[in-house]
Every structure is written in structure tokens, then in C-alpha cells.
Amino acid sequence: MSTTDTREPRVHVRDIDGTGELGHRADEPLALASVAKILITLEFARQAATGALDPAERVVARRQDRLGGSGTAGFADDVELSLRDCANLAMTISDNTAADLIEERVGTEPVHLLVRELGLEHTRFTGGPRALLRAMLDDARAAGADPAAPHPPDPARVTSSTPRDLTRLLQLVWTDAAAPPRACAFVRELMARQLVRARLASGFAPPVHVSGKTGTLPGLRMEAGVVEYPDGHRYAVAVAAVGAEAGGNGHEVDAALGRAARAAVEELRGREETDPRGPALPDGPTDVIR
């Protein structure tokens, strides 16, 4: 199997409405890249739902402050938009500047406290896209390395989590346990509208519905999302290719991540049919994703 088949993906699948779970290398920390925008948007939605901020509040994406990526990064002039529209851009097309504008407004510490309140013991939040870029540049300069080389940043220095923590976060969002129900519904709606369909969604055909948020860095391709079947079963999934696994043809890696996610979900579904109680399963390689 080639590296573009993601021989050793990090993957975790969790039955949202049950106790079943299945994982492979699911407790290894990962830099979250743009998957961190889920946390930023959730805290924004929580503050909006409790009246701590007005989602229609206007902010300006200044030309000189923009990071690379999609959305406002390609605009020639300053752009004024609402915080709510920033959330839309951050989650649907992964606009980095929009995410930073939200994080600047809601505050880094409240997002950090949200992580703690949700019991995500292996998740850390140190800031938005700009903070991640600074950390990567600092590490590259210190090591005399190319910041674009296929090596993801050290998870201990940036916003990071594990596949198991990510599926727990999504379970809490999908069951209205992460924030007020309308805040959770807002995050779910935006994740359902993500435009990138090449990773998690590529592994599932309609009428299966997939919501997600991708993250991409040199040496890292990942996605966290929820797969919903017509029979009503819902599964939170986090899957990632790291280092050499993320190299090669990006489209092939993305498709391989979709296949790995589907194989893991179907394995868990099969085991739950055998044991309807859906017992938690030990972390380790499985035949379908090894």
C-alpha cells in the first residue's frame, strides 16, 4: 500500500447516540489546523446565544492583516462584515482572516475555558490561524527549516487535540450539550454547508449526510465531522494523515481519508448490530483500516 493510501491514519468513530466507539491511533495529539475553527465558532455562537455579543456586530477585514487561504484573503480592499458572516466564511470556506476576527472578539481565554468545561482533556487552544502561523514560522526559523516542508507543527506548541477528543466534541454539539441548543444548531448548520467534499464526504454516498470541517497544513490533512444515516444513526468521525502519509497527490490522500472513515464507520455499525449495546472498543488497528 502506498503512502497515499494512508496506511496508518489516525481515526476515531463514535456513535453519537450510543456508547460504541472504534479507533486507531486515536489518542495521538494533532495540530488542529482549521479544524480549530469549530471551537472558535462554537464559543462565538455560545456568546451570541447568551447575549454576551451581538452576532450582527460589524468588523473590518483589513487588507494588510489578511492571511493566505480562501475568502477575504483574495480581496483587493478592506471588507466590512458581521461577526455572524465571519463565522459563515470561516466554517464553509475556511476563511482564516474571518476566523481570526471572531477569535479576537470572543477572546482566546474563553475558548480555552470552553475546552476545559467540555471535559476535552487532550485538547488545548492557544489561538486562531494567525497564532498558528506565527508558531510555525518561529519553529522553522529556530530549526533553520523551510516552513512549507511536509512536517506539521509540534502539537505541544499550538492548538491541538486528538481524534478521540474531536469526536467527543462533535457528540456534544450534536446533542446540544456543548452550548445552548441554538448555538449548537448554528455550528451544525455551518458544518453541513462546508464546501469541501473531497475528504470525509467522498467516502459516503447519498442519502448518507455528511457535515464536517477540514484542516490542512504542510504534512497534515484531516477532517472532523458527523455522518448521518437514513436509519437515524449518527456517527462522529475524526480522521487524519500526518507526515509522509499526507504527502503525494492531495486528491488521492483526501479520497483515502474518506475510504478510511467509511471503513471505520461501517465496522462500528457492524459490531453494533452484533451487540446492540454498542460497547466501547479498545483503541488499536482494525482489519478494515490497517
Image: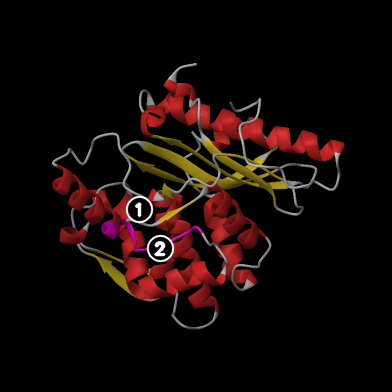
Q: Residues within 10 Å of mark 1 (few under 14, many from 20)?
A: many
CA gap, disc 1 and disc 2:
18 Å
Q: Position of residue 36 (x, y in %)?
A: 43, 56
Q: Is residue 128 magenta?
A: yes
Instruction: Read off the residue under disc 1.
Output: 95
* Label 2 secondary element: loop
Mark 1 or mark 2: which is in front? 2
Q: Quadrant of the C terminus?
A: top right
Q: Which mark is residue 125?
A: 2
Viewer-proximal residue, 219 or 290?
A: 290
Viewer-proximal residue, 117 or 142?
A: 142
Q: Amino acid at mark 2?
A: Phe
- Number of labels in the image equals 2
Residue 71 position (above or below residue 49): above
Residue 24 position (above or below residue 113): above
Q: Position of residue 94 (x, y in %)?
A: 39, 50
Q: Residue at x 62, y 36 (%)?
A: 284
Q: Which residues are magenta?
A: 122-131
Query: Residue 188's quadrant in the figure?
Result: bottom right
Q: Is residue 228 left or right of residue 141?
A: right
Q: Earlier in the sequence, mark 1 or mark 2?
A: 1
